Image (spheres, helix red, strand yellow):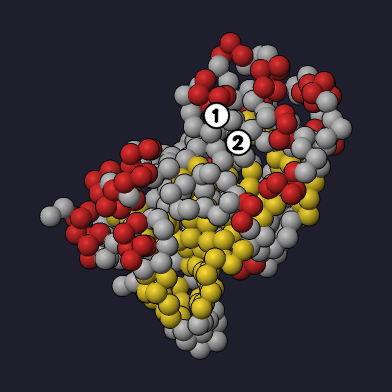
């Protein structure tokens, strides 16, 4: 029996994952990832500060200087770092036994991942290319969902406000006028956008093709397997971005054509007058019983979903779900299946934690025993998964 199959069976269909850290060369770290203060530059000063942690990932980070497997999740086979194996190798070997027949037949792999991103200041107004634009350069579109957990947001950053698209009164000609000056001056493109104050324990769905500038909250972000992006804002918090950031992921013959840059955006969605009604998400209770409640927190789309499970002190529950999922313990401690689980207060770079797991489809459907061993504190777990999870339609919310 292979070590992969043995690890899978020993965990009764649940895998213990190790922390995956991502540095970025822009913005400033919000320092809410529970990473030790001495370790934010643990991957090298030239790489920038660690500002993201990725979960359930079979995707590589597309950042300059990234290592071969950077961004990909590892499974601990024995509770240590020494004998770790890529989650992707588990997916490749176990296939439907791990993630189910539907995902294997349709995508051939686990099609999504999640992250916590943690920036002190808002991000640049940027876009993730839609399906047609992505096809032209052989990449996948990026559909993403935001949720702002209170447990990771004792500090709200410098500006907890996000921009989405453009005001409905704005024309394409106005946007092109700003983009034409991208290499000449600060174009202040968010002057044409509209912003919303962010509310803790709520979220937003952001389709591919929407220009957006996320605010400064630490954000839980389930998303499609992609890191495609182009920056439509050239000066952000004093940082200057070059034209190649605007023309990223375009065919070479289109890079100098601003009309082609603009075509990447879904104009109807970007200027929708009812944008908030379409894409703002409040939690919706999925199931509730003695000592527990599970809520939908990411829903109303065809790609990615997420739930929040809260178990009261001293209580336990056999919780059933429709699909394989990755999960993160964000508060409390107890057991998850055969594993001890706990939300860490401070993590050293390279340290093993007991807060991240991956649950196979059959185990999820049969049910996972989750127990809260605290006398006083709730056990809170976030779960992220793909399109086979019977994602709650918006009209049923």
Vertical comparison of 233 with 296: above or below: above
Tell me which residue sits at (64%, 52%) in the image: 395
**What is the C-alpha distance between the residues marked 2 and 1?**
8 Å
Q: In the rendered image, which residue does mark 2 sit on?
A: 208
Name the residue at the top extreme: 253
Q: In the rendered image, which residue does mark 1 sit on?
A: 131
Indicate the position of residue 356 as horizontal and vertical percent values: 43, 62
| Chain-order first, disc 2 or disc 1 | 1
129 or 160, which lies in front? 129
Q: Quadrant of the C terminus?
A: bottom right
Indicate the position of residue 14 as horizontal and vertical percent values: 32, 62
Compared across the picture, whether 139 is left or right of 207 comes to: left
Judge whether residue 116 can be spotted in this image: no
156 or 46, which lies in front? 156
Residue contact between numbered discs 2 and 1, judged by CB atoms under 8 Å:
yes
Name the residue at the right extreme: 169
Indicate the position of residue 381 as horizontal and vertical percent values: 50, 67
Compared across the picture, whether 309 is left or right of 101 comes to: right
Q: Quadrant of the N terminus?
A: bottom left
SS type, badge 1: helix
- Neighbours of disc 1 within 10 Å: few (<14), some (14-19), many (20+): some
Compared across the picture, whether 366 is left or right of 21 comes to: left
Judge whether residue 384 can be spotted in this image: yes
């Amino acid at each position: 029996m292979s070590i992969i199959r043995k690890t899978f069976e020993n965990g009764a269909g649940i895998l213990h994952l190790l922390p995956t850290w991502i540095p970025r060369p822009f913005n400033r770290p919000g320092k809410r990832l529970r990473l030790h203060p001495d370790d934010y530059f643990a991957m090298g000063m030239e790489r920038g500060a660690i500002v993201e942690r990725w979960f359930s990932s079979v995707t590589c980070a597309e950042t300059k200087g990234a290592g071969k497997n950077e961004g990909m999740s590892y499974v601990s086979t024995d509770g240590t770092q020494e004998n770790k194996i890529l989650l992707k190798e588990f997916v490749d070997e176990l296939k439907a036994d791990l993630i189910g027949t539907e995902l294997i037949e349709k995508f051939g792999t686990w099609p999504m991942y999640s992250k916590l991103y943690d920036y002190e200041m808002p991000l640049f107004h940027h876009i993730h290319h839609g399906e047609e634009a992505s096809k032209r350069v052989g990449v996948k579109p990026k559909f993403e969902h935001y949720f702002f957990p209170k447990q990771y947001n004792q500090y709200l950053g410098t500006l907890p406000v996000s921009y989405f698209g453009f005001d409905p009164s704005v024309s394409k000609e106005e946007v092109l006028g700003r983009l034409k000056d991208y290499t000449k001056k600060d174009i202040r493109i968010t002057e044409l956008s509209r912003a919303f104050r962010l509310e803790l324990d709520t979220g937003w769905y952001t389709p591919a093709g929407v220009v957006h500038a996320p605010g400064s909250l630490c954000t839980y972000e389930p998303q499609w397997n992609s890191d495609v992006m182009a920056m439509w804002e050239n000066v952000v918090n004093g940082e200057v971005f070059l034209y190649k950031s605007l023309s990223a992921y375009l065919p070479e013959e289109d890079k100098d054509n601003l009309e082609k840059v603009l075509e990447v955006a879904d104009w109807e969605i970007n200027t929708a007058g009812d944008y908030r009604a379409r894409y703002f998400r409040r939690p919706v209770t999925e199931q509730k019983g003695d000592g527990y409640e599970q809520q939908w927190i990411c829903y109303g789309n065809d790609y990615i979903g997420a739930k929040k499970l809260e178990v009261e002190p001293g209580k336990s529950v056999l919780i059933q779900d429709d699909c394989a999922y990755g999960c993160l313990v964000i508060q409390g401690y107890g057991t998850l299946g055969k594993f001890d689980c706990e939300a860490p207060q401070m993590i050293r770079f390279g340290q093993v934690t007991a807060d991240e797991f991956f649950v196979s489809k059959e185990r999820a459907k049969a049910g996972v025993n989750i127990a809260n061993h605290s006398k006083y504190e709730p056990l809170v777990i976030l779960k992220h998964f793909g399109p086979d999870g019977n994602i709650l339609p918006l009209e049923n919310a």
